[in-house]
Amino acid sequence: MGQPSATEKPGKEKAIRVIVPGRPVPKERPQVGMRGRKAYVYTPERTKNYEQLVALCASAAYAGDVLACPVAVTIDLHLYGKRRIDVDNCAKSILDGMNGIVYA
């Protein structure tokens, strides 16, 4: 899981490190399903599972109150192999997974 790490910096700034194991999963487009004559929109299972993993790691690394102040996020993705990945959508799934746990 995420390794807890928070470092106080001068000026009440706090650095929080959240480590998510495994290959990052890009956020997939919402899917539309039909149930009878009603259409509904849902998040694909793979994206939902990855966001839950990020949320679990973030809650293990940060046990404080949800931040309501401006936040800067740095994301380091460690990729291997020649397979391409959409980095922007990886960032979206990581940020969505931390939303409501680390920041509002």
Image (spheres, rainbow, N blue to C red):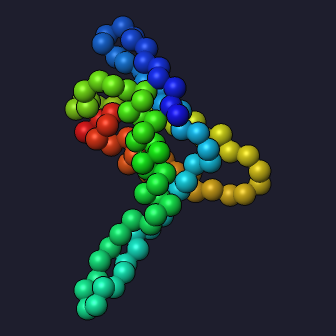
In front of the other: 86 or 42: 42
Name the spot of residue 90 as percent of width and height, x first.
52, 51
- Placement of 81 over or under 66, stated as above or below: below
Name the spot of residue 41 as percent of width and height, x first.
32, 73
In front of the other: 21 or 67: 21
In front of the other: 48 or 26: 48
Can you see residue 95? Answer: no
Residue farthest toward the left in the current orientation of the protein: 68
Residue farthest toward the bottom in the current orientation of the protein: 37
Residue drawn at x 42%, y 48% is 52
83 to the left or right of 40: right
Can you see residue 99? Answer: yes
**Image quadrant occupied by the C terminus:** top left
Residue farthest toward the right in the current orientation of the protein: 82
Q: Quadrant of residue 103?
A: top left
- Placement of 41 over or under 86, stated as above or below: below
Residue drawn at x 58%, y 57% is 86
Name the spot of residue 74 as percent of width and height, x first.
49, 33
Name the spot of residue 25 as percent of width and height, x first.
55, 54
25 to the left or right of 68: right
> In this figure, what is the number of numbered marks?
0
- Placement of 36 over or under 89, stated as above or below: below
Residue drawn at x 35%, y 69% is 42
